[in-house]
Image (spheres, helix red, strand yellow):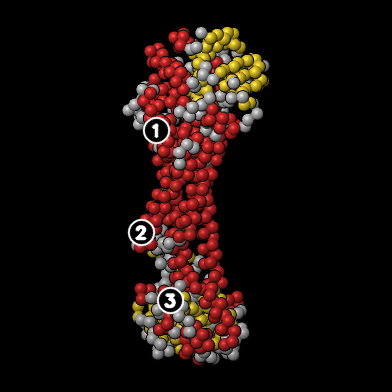
Amino acid sequence: MNTVELKNTSRHYQSGSLVVKAVDQVDLHLKKGDFAVLAGPSGSGKSTLLNLIGGLDRPTDGEVYIDNELLNDKSDEQLSRERLEKIGFIFQAYNLIPVLTAYENVQFIMQIRGIPEKEHREKIMPLLKELGLEGLEDRKPPELSGGQQQRVAVARAIVLEPAIILADEPTANLDSETAVNLLQIMKQLNEEKNVTFLFSSHDPMVIEIAERVISMRDGKITRDERK
Amino acid sequence: MILFKLAWRNIWRNVTRTMIQIMVIAGSLFFVIWMQNISCGSYEKMIADSVRSGSGHLAFQHSDYLSERRPELVIPADKALKLAQNHDEIKHILPRLQIPGLIRSSRENCSAMILGVDFNREKEVNVILADKRKVEGRLPTELETTKAYVGEKLALRLQVKLGQKIVFMFQNLEGVITSKLYRIAGIFRSGVGKIDSGMVFVDRRSLGKAFGDPDAVHEVALILKDRTTLESIKKTLEMESDKSMPESSKLLAWETTMKQLADAIKIDQANLQFMIFLLYVLVTIGTINLLLMSVLERTREFGLLRAIGFEKSRIRNLIGFEAILVGTIGSFFGLLVGTLASAYSWHYGLDFSAMFGAQEVAGMLFEPTIKSIWNWKWMFGLTTSMIFMVYLASIYPAGKAMRVNPSEAMRSYQ
Ligand SMILES: Nc1ncnc2c1ncn2[C@@H]1O[C@H](COP(=O)(O)OP(=O)(O)OP(=O)(O)O)[C@@H](O)[C@H]1O
Ligand SMILES: [Mg+2]
C-alpha cells in the first residue's frame, strides 16, 4: 500500500503570458515508513510538490492520493480534515502559534481533533521529553531557540500519528549541528514509530541522513534513489 | 473552548490596539446610555412640569374646547370631581375656568386670560403658583373671592400695586358683557413672557357665578401618581363618564392637550436616535478597520492554521470570537460607566441653567435641573446592539482571513 501516490501530477502557474511549470508531470510513490528527502536547487518545485501532497494546493493536472484516497475532488473543508487526520506539516520557520506555549501548541492539534482532555498530558509529556524539550513546555515560541521551536513543531506534527509528515526545509534556519540533530530525532521517530517522512532540503549534510533521495529540477523528478 | 482561549490571547497581542478599541466601544456606549437616560429624564421632567401648569396627564374638557377655545364650551365641574375622587391613582384634581377678557385699572387696560382655580388644590401643583415664583404679596385663599394673583408684567402694564383695584370685563354664558371687581393680593413671575403679561388667577366658583354658572369649568385636569397608569385610568374613567358626564365632554390625554410638547419630545427623541445610529456606524467602521489590520498582520498564521488542519469556518469563528470578546469587554465597561454616570445624574441631577437661559420650551415652563431616569430597556438594547454591531464588523475581516490561500501564505511570509 502506498502512503502517497502522485500520478502525472502538474502544477502550472500562469504569470502573464508565461507558464511556470512549478511541478510538471510528476509520478511518485511513497511507502509507509519511508524517510525521503526532496533535493534540488531553489525554484525546482520542492515546496509546490509538498503543498500538493498536503492538499494545501491543488494540481492543475494529474492525481494525488493519500492512503489510496483521491484528494483532487475533496472540498476545502474536507482537505482540512484530511490534513488534520493524516498529515503533519513542518515548515522552515514560524511553525508555532505565538500566543500558545510549547505544550499548548502540541495540545492544540489534539483539541481541534476532539481528543478527550485527559489523554493529552500522558501523550504530550513523553513526546516532549523524547524530543529533548523537557522543562520548556510552558515557554512561548519567542522564548525558545530556533531548534527548540522546530522540535516542538515535530512534536505537534507527530502527536496524532499521521500517515505522513511533510517538512519543507525544516532545517534551513538552523545551524548545521542543530540541523543534523533535528534530522536524527526525525529519523529515530521514523524507526520507532514507522512514521513516513518526506522533507525537502538543499543541505548536503541533511540529505546525507535520508534513506531515499528524490532529486528535482525544473518541476520534474530527475533521480530517485534508495541507499 | 480552544477557540475562546486562542481568541482571548490573540486580542492581547497588541495591547494598545485592543485598548483603543475597547475604549472607543466603551466610550461610545457610555455616552449613548447616559444621553438616553438624561434625555428620558428631561422628557419626564418636561411632562411632569407641564402637566402641572398645563392640562394634567388627563383632562375632562368639552370635546370642541381644545380646537375652538370658545368660553361657552363648558362642562360640569362637580360631576367630574366626583368621578375622579374615586380613584387612588389620581393625585390631584384641578377644575379650571378660563375666561378671556379685558382688564382695566384706574390708568390702563389690556386683554388677559382670567383663570378661575380652586386655590387650595391648585397651589400644591401649579408651578406658577409656587412660592419661589412669587414677587410680592401672597396667594389668595379659597374664601377671598375678590382677590386676584396677577403676572408681573401685567401688573406693570396696568400700573397697579398690591391692594389696588382691577376690573375684569368679559362675556357671560348668555353673551352679555359682565364685569367683576378684584383687588390684587399677589404678583408672580413665571419667566414665561406670555404668562407673566397676560394671566390672572382668581377663585373659580365666584368667577363662575359671574359667568353664569358656578359649576361651569373648561377643564378638570387630573395629575396621576404614576404616569404609566395613564392608559388604564383613562379607560376606566371613560367608561364611568359615559354614564355621569354629558355627552359633549371628553377625556383627553396630555399628548393631545399639549401636542406641541409631545411633538417636541418626539423630534428630540428621533434626533437622539439618529445620533446614536451615526455613532454606532462610526464605531463599526473603526472596528472593521482595526480588525482588518489585525487580520492582515496574521496572514501567515492563518496559512499555518489551515496547514495543520484548521477548517476555514473555524478561522471565521476565531475572528468572530475575537470581535465578540472585544465588543463584550468594551460594552461591559461602557455599561458600567454609563450606569455610574446615570446614577450620579439620577441622584444629584444636572444643572442646565447655564445652557438654557430662558426656562421655556414650547411655551411651557421648566426647571433647569434635570435628573436622569433609568431606562433599563434602552440600556440593555444599546449594550447588546453594540456587541452585535462589533460582531457584524468582524464579518468582512473574517472573510478575508478565511480566504487566505495557505500555500501562498506559507510561501510569501517566510
Ligand atoms: N504563486 C506563484 N505564481 C507564479 N509562480 C510561482 C508561484 N509559486 C511558485 N512559483 C514558481 O514555481 C517554481 C517552484 O517554486 P517552489 O517554491 O516550489 O520551489 P522550491 O524548490 O521550493 O524553491 P526553494 O528551494 O527556493 O524553496 C518557482 O519557479 C516559483 O517561482
Ligand atoms: Mg521551497
| Dot 2: chain letter | B
Determine whether label 1 and label 2 are within 8 Å by CB: no
* Picture coordinates of residue B327, whole percent (x, y): 46, 45
Depth check, mark 2 against mark 3: the one in front is 2
Q: Which residue is mark 2?
A: B344
How far, Cα to Cα, is label 1 from label 2? 56 Å
Q: Residue at x 44, y 78 (%)?
A: B91
Of the residues shown, which amino acid type is indicated by label 1?
Glu
Depth check, mark 1 against mark 2: the one in front is 1
Q: Circle 2 — which element?
A: helix
Numbered tag placed on residue A122 in the rendering: 1
* Residue B20 in view of the camera: yes
Q: Residue furthest left?
A: A135
Q: Circle 1 — which element?
A: helix
| Dot 1: chain letter | A
Q: Residue at x 52, y 40 (%)?
A: B317
How crowded pointer 1 is (Cα within 10 Å; few <14, some 14-19, many 20+) is rated as: few
Precedes in sequence: disc 2 or disc 3: 3
Depth check, mark 3 against mark 1: the one in front is 1
* Picture coordinates of residue A201, whole percent (x, y): 49, 13
Determine whether label 2 and label 3 are within 8 Å by CB: no
* Picture coordinates of residue A11, whole percent (x, y): 63, 19
- Tell me the quarter of the picture where residue B35 sits: bottom left
Q: Which residue is mark 3?
A: B126
Q: Residue at x 62, y 32 (%)?
A: A75
Of the residues shown, which amino acid type is indicated by label 2?
Tyr
Of the residues shown, which amino acid type is indicated by label 3?
Asn
* Residue B169 in view of the camera: no
How far, Cα to Cα, is label 2 from label 3? 28 Å
- Residue B388, compared with residue B225, is above or below; it is above
